[in-house]
Structure formats: structure tokens, C-alpha cells
Image (spheres, rainbow, N blue to C red):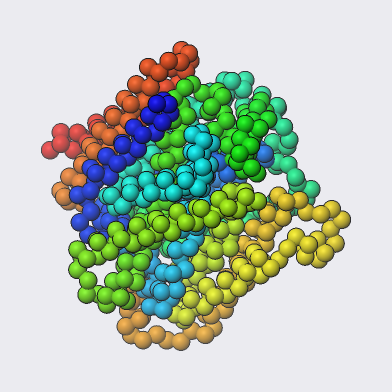
Amino acid sequence: MNIDIVVVLAYFGFLVAIGWLFRSFSTSTSDYFRGGGKMLWWMVGATAFMTQFSAWTFTGAAGKAFTDGFAIVILFLANAFGYFMNWAYFAPKFRQLRVVTAIEAIKKRFGRTSEQFFTWGSMPDSIISAGVWLNGLAIFVAAVFGIDMGTTIIATGLVLLIMSVTGGSWAVVASDFVQMLVIMAVTITCAIAAYFHGGGIMNIVDNFNGNFMVGSNLNYMSIFVLWIVFIFVKQFGVMNNSINAYRYLCAKDSENARKAAGLAAVLMIVGPVIWFLPPWYVNAFMPDFALAFESMGNKAGDAAYLAFVQQVMPAGMVGLLMAAMFAATMSSMDSGLNRNAGIFIRNFYSPILRKGEASEKELMLASRLATVAMGIIIIAIGLFINSLKHLSLFDIVLNIGALIGFPMLIPVLLGMWVRNTPDWSGWATLVVGGVVSYVFGIALTAGHIENLFGLETALTGREWADLKVGLSLGAHVVITGGFFLCTYFFFKPRSEARQEEIDELFRDWNTPVVASGEEQQNLDTKQRSILGNLISIAGFGILAMALIPNEPSGRGLFILCGSMVLTAGILLLQAARKPAQAE
């Protein structure tokens, strides 16, 4: 059997073991969907980081890095800016909401009707994004093992679904931390190899085919600048609204939520150069690599990272990278599985269908069934996206965020600052946002812009894609955001019960959560111990890959990669022993 397949299967077994070890941690829906709000910052930070990281980073984003150089880094720096604002203010506030799902906080702010609008409106964005990530994984799997894309999407989707259902949020967050370590170790190793094979970063940049800083197919620099501005605006909104508070609801207290955001911010700052140095190397020294991936059609450029690993890295590294891709996609798909299942159960099934009468046992069963249903939908979306041969994964992801996701963020972001708006302001703003998305995302064409401004040079495909994102986001900020602010003038005093609900929301928002007690300390020790042992096993497994027949330099790369993972495991085991010694 191919060594790469053996590595993938071994890693898959490792992930299944994580789910099995944490299966007993989930005894309620609070445990299943947010770990009971008892997790340590490094686990929470890892899962916050991994929700913005998937196989797409190594396919669509790597393809963008191959063609346009440094431009893709801007998107990830915008992510880092969003996480920095989490650290500076929002992350502790989100934890202080004291809810199981973010939609429960929206219900307190905007009432029952808006709760249902957001329940059914929040799911498409993350479900479609999960389908995109699954498609990105399938590109890698199909290219490496020569398997049909459709078959790959179905098979990998089912595998990831099984892993996600097994242990709930405890298993998912724990595996996110392991996956983060493995992915960072693998990509650091690949970046080091690219650095030395390419003769240093400056030599790679000097040999880059095209404009390294801004990329190709760009006639109007103003469009690129507009894109940068609105990407930062978009990612600020994405990261700092109560819908995406779910990232920090599982933290054990306010301070751990803040530290988690800081970890995610640091990883997003240092990560891009590490991740995209190999595709830049490929552009400089392997510009014709896509000829080997003609079966992928227009998406052949998305295989730039894979081409680097196949041509430059030692035997077995492709399997380790593929294992990391499985891991990254599983963590990202959780946004479309565990989170959406939680919203469905806690904000529709329990209060509407069962009218609060369902037992915890029934809710746990319903939660797992809902997760399965979400998984099947995501697989179907992955198959549909695969049929869109004329679109790049990069454009699909950005358009999803601009046209579907961003309109939902405006009322939940502004609603925490402008408090005296009527309850209907929540759902009405969604309706207005839907109209804006249609006008600027579907009806508006490049021809309209060229005629309106009398452009002498037609917009390139890249320019129109960038401008479309910027115009859509700008329209939402001005029109959708402006509509929400105008509802202030229609505010009327609320009923006593509704006012008390809102007052409770903002009391929680401003009251820190402090975790203490022997039970929490014991759980902290257990988290460190289990993860320390699992990560140490993973580290030894990667070190063992140095035995694969390779050149000495290739064996050294496996030793480097395994040592990074093993060191993290040993540090966690040492931390787990300290409380016991103090006692």
C-alpha cells in the first residue's frame, strides 16, 4: 500500500480515538455544543483559529498566492485584525453572554420573531462555507490518489461526519488543538524547505513571475485599495458580532476567552508567510506545474501547494499533509455541523416544536440526528460547488461572505451599541440586507460599472471580482447599516418583561465570568493530561516517519516536524502535574 495512504489512515484512526476519549464529557446539550463553558484558553484559541482555517487555505488560497503573490496575505491579516479586536474587547464580552448558542443572545436582544429569522438565516453561510471547504479537500484527495471528485466528496464528507458526531464540542475542540499543532508543524517544515531550496525569501520574490505585491490582471490600483479597505471592514464585522460569539462560549471564564483570542491573532499574523512561501516558490521555480493537473480543469492552479510537497518534500510528507487537510476540514466543517445543530435544537426544536418539554436525553438524541442531517446537506453542497467549473474557490468563499454572511452581522453588531431600537429592527434589517445583496451581488454587472464611470479599459476578471466584493460590503455598511440606525426613531417603550430580558442581557455582557473551585481545577488538569498524551503520541508517530527511506535531509525534516509536536505534548504533561504537586 502507498505510504501516503498508510499515513492518512493512521491519522484518521488517531482522530477517531480523540472522539472516543472525549465521548463521556458530553452529558447535556451545553456540553455537546459548547463544552459546558469549561475549556482552557489554548483549546479555545485553537478552535477559534481553526474555524478560519481549512483545506481551502492550501487550495483556493494557495492558488491565489501562486498567481497574485502577497495579495492573499492581506485577507489573513484582516483575520488577525478581527482577532486582535476580540482580544482587546469583544472575546470576554462574548463569554459573558452566558448562553449555549449565540442565537439565544439574539433572542434576548430582539425577541422571539427575530430569533427565528436568525436561526434560519444564520445556517446557509456556514453550511455553504463548509461545502466549499469539503470541495477544497476533495481537490487534494482526487489529485493525490486519482479518485473521482464526486466520489471523494461523498466519501470524505461521510468520514468527517462520523468524526464530528462522535464526541460533540469536547472532541471537536480537543481535535482542533491537535490539528493546529500538526498543521503548523507540517507547514513550518514545508516553509523551511521552500526557504532553503529557493535560496531565501528575497530570491524567491526576485524570481516571482508577475507583480509579487499586487498580483496580475490589475489595471486600476484604486480597485485593489478598495478591496483591502472593505476586506478589513468585513473581517472586523465577521469576528466581532454576537453570532460568532460561539468561538468563546466554551471558554471557562472571561480571561481565558481573551487569551484565546490573543492566540488566534498571533497565529493569523505569523501563519500566512509560513503557509504561502511554498506556492510562491512554485511560481518562481515551477511555473508550469499545472500541466500535471490538467484533470482539474480551471482549478489546476489550486494544486500549487500539493505540487510543491510532491516535488520538493520527502516521501511520506504528502500523506502527512493530506492527514492535516482532513483535520483542518473536519474542524471547519464543525461550523456547519455542531454549531448549526445547536442552533436548530436550542432555538427551534426545543422552544418551538417541543415547547420546552423535551428531556435532556431526548435533546441529546435530537442533537446527533440534526448533526447527521447537516452533514448530508454539506455533502450535497460540496457536489454542487464541484460542478461550478468556471468559478475559483477563492471567489466562491469571498462572495459567500459578502452576499450571505455580512448582512446578518450588521444588526447583531450594532444592536449591542444602539440599544433603543424596536424588536422588529433585527429581522427587518435582514430583509433589507437580502435586497442589497441581490442588487449588488447578482443584478449589478461589470458592464454597468464600465458604462457608469466611462472606463476606457474594460475591467479584468480579477478586478470585477474584487470590486464586486467591495461594492457589496460598502452597500451593506451604508444602506443596511443605515436602515438599522434609522429604526432608532421608531422605538417605543417595551413591555416590562421584554425590558427586563434586555437588561439581563446587558448585565451579563458587563459582568465578568470567573471560574474557580476544585471541580474546575480537576477538569483543567484532565484537559492538559489527555491532550498532552495524545499530542505526545502524535509527535512520536511523526518522528517514526524518519524511518521511511529518504535522503538524510528528508529524514531530518520529519525529525524537525515531530519534535515540534512532541515538545508541545511534553509541556502540557508537565503543566498537568503541577497542580497535583502543589496540593
Relative vertical location of residue 171 with respect to residue 196 in this rendering, above or below: below
Q: Position of residue 545 (x, y in %)?
A: 38, 22
Relative vertical location of residue 186 with respect to residue 374 in this rendering, above or below: above
Q: Position of residue 407 (x, y in %)?
A: 54, 67
Relative vertical location of residue 475 with respect to residue 220 in this rendering, above or below: below
Please give the name of the residue rendered at 58% of the width and 63% of the height, measured from the top-left corner. 403
Q: Give the left or right position of residue 332, taking residue 533 as reference.
A: right
User: What is the residue that sits farthest to the left in this orientation?
Assistant: 583
Along the line of sight, which residue is nearer the eye, 86 or 342? Answer: 342
**How many numbered marks appear?**
0
Quadrant of residue 319 within the rendered picture: top left
Please give the name of the residue rendered at 19% of the width and 33% of the height, measured from the top-left corner. 577
Please give the name of the residue rendered at 27% of the width and 75% of the height, measured from the top-left corner. 354
Quadrant of residue 118 within the rendered picture: bottom left
Please give the name of the residue rendered at 36% of the width and 65% of the height, measured from the top-left corner. 343
User: In which quadrant is the N terminus drawn?
Assistant: top left
Q: Give the left or right position of residue 36, taking residue 319 as reference.
A: left
User: In which quadrant is the C terminus drawn?
Assistant: top left
User: What is the residue that sits farthest to the right in this orientation?
Assistant: 456
Residue 511 in view (yes/no): no
Along the line of sight, which residue is nearer the eye, 217 or 81? Answer: 217
Residue 350 in view (yes/no): yes
Q: Position of residue 337 (x, y in %)?
A: 38, 56
Relative vertical location of residue 477 with respect to residue 197 in this rendering, above or below: below
Along the line of sight, which residue is nearer the eye, 532 or 332? Answer: 332
Q: Position of residue 472 (x, y in %)?
A: 64, 63
